[in-house]
Structures are given as structure tokens and as C-alpha cells.
Image: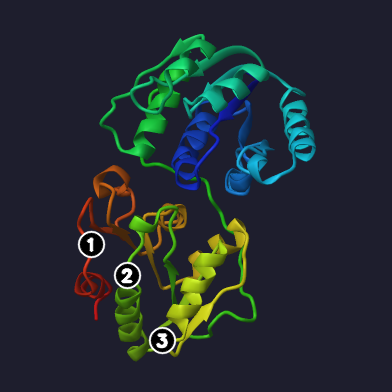
Amino acid sequence: MQRILISKITSLGDVLFALPMITDIRQHFPDVKIDWVVDESFAALPALHPAIDRVIGVPLRGIKKQKLMQASRNLLRAIGELRTEHYDVVLDCHGMIKSALLSKVAKAKHIIGPPNYRLGEQVSRHAYDRQVSPDATLPAVDWYRSYAGLALGYQVTGQPDFGLRPAPFQPEWLPQKPYVMCFHAASKVEKTWPIEAWEAVLKDLEDHGIAAVLPWGAPHEYEFAQALAVRLTRAVVAPKMTVGEIAGLIDRALWVIGVDTGMTHLAESLNKPTIALYTVTDSATYHPAWNPQAHSLGGNGQIPSVDAVLDLIGR
């Protein structure tokens, strides 16, 4: 096998959870070229993995925001880039119509897809030469690793290695004191934690000389960060950052506290002391058993308490 294409389009957290299988593939096929097709919004994350040779960003999410001609040109450009190589295998890790179509567009001898019970849309199965079915009860990271192992014919062993090696990042605005990274924003409002809870935790940390860094991505997230910062004395609202820069700040942080979002899971994958706050999702599905410094609080319908967070940090 000389070249393989991974088709995992979205979202940030799911792209992250699929990274350890890249490390596994490289271990079992040292000379294989590995490309990854992904929505351009998330292309920066797989680009951080040194075993990935090429990341092809496709403007799927941005199509609705663009004029028809511009969207068509951008999409055709990405498809043209996708078709510049011939692949021995396309491994569709997404299982949706959009990933199946991109898999078919690529020039490949074989296309392998997931079972529809896990990820997908029934129509997508027609794109595949073969489907492989890992244990449906596996946590996300283990499921992707098992899926790739079954598809490519190797046994998965050991702890997951995300392959992420963030570059140092120390901007002038970064607090000189120890700081916690606070990922307060999520794709769904029901995944967020109340501002009063954030305030209580961060005020307690301020009393112990610990500052807070508040990243954001969308305008409403910036507004939340500003509203939280004015209630505190040592909080810094970060400027807009790349995924690589955020990873660099995570690497320097004393702790990371965050809701169920891709950046919180990024901190877990970097083996940082992390507290993940779950409110509407099952923490067992995403809890990083490989990281002994990672903690998961709450769950579906269970809002984590301020005291539980502070007890973990060690008042």
C-alpha cells in the first residue's frame, strides 16, 4: 500500500478523536503516504499531525455563506486537488453522504466505509466496496482505532497517541502568572455552563493567584468572554487564534476547564490536567481513559457543580 486517503469531514472533536488511528497506521505502514480530506474549517487540526502528508480542505460549511459562483469555484478547486493523486484505499470515517461523495470523487482502488448504525446515512453505503463494523459500544477514540485496524488488517495495541506536538506560543498579552484555559463555548447552547458558575470558580482561583485565559471563536462567544471578564480581575479575553496557537497555550496552562467541545478534548489529548463539563452528553463516551489527569464532571441532564470543580483543582 502506497497511499491512503482519510475522509473525515467534521467536526473538530470528531476529527481530533480520529487522529490516534493515523499514528497506528503510520506504525504499521511506515512508508505509506497519508492524505486527509476535511472541511476547511477544521483543516488546521489534522495538519498538526506529523504523519499526515497532505490535508485537503473542502469548503462545505462555507458554501451557504458564499455566492453561487464563488462557492462553485472553491468547491471545484478542492475537488481538483483531491483528484491529483491515486489512492490504494479511501477510508471513510464519516459515513455521511457528503463524505461518501468525496470518497467516490477521489481516484481510488478501494473505498471502505463504516456501518450505518454508528455514523450514518443509509445511502452512503452504496459508495463503499466494503464496510467494517467495530464494537458499537467502544468510546470514540477506541472506535476509530479499531475501525482503521479492521479496515487495513492490523491489531490495535497500546494507548492512543494523538501525534500532536504543539509549537511554543507565548504572546505578549499572555498573563505572567499561572493561568487556566477556559473553553466556555460550545456548538450548542445547552452544552454551555452558566456564567455564574464560571465566575465562582475563577474568582476562587484568582484568590490563589491564578489567572484565566478566555478564548473565543464566534462573535457571541466573544461577548460571553467579555461579560465574564468584567466580573473578574485577572481574566484575559484572548484575541482570535489559530488551532496551533491555542494548542501552544494549552501546553503552557496550569489547568484546562471546558465544556464538551473540541478544544477541551484537544487539551485532554495533550495530556494536560483537564476538567470537562458535561451537561447534555454522556461523559463515558468521551472520557479520555488514557489521560490520568483528565476528569469528567456531569452528564446528560446533570449540571456540574462549582464545588466539584474546585475540589478537583484542590482549593
**Which element carries disc 3, helix, strand or loop?**
loop
- SS for tag 1? loop
The answer to which of marks 1 and 2 sits earlier in the sequence is 2
- The residue at 62%/24% (across/down) is 102
**Looking at the rendered structure, which numbered label has been put on residue 190?**
none
Alpha-carbon span between mark 1 and mark 2: 9 Å
Nearer the N terminus, badge 3 or badge 1? 3
Residue 56 left/right relative to 250: right
Colour option used: rainbow
**Quarter of the N terminus within the rendering:** top right
Q: Point out the image quarter for the C terminus.
A: bottom left
Q: Which residue is mark 1?
A: 303
- Residue topped by disc 2: 194
Image quadrant in which you'd find residue 228: bottom left
Between residue 3 and residue 202, name the one nearer to us: 202
At label 2, the amino acid type is: Pro
Residue ID at (48%, 29%): 94
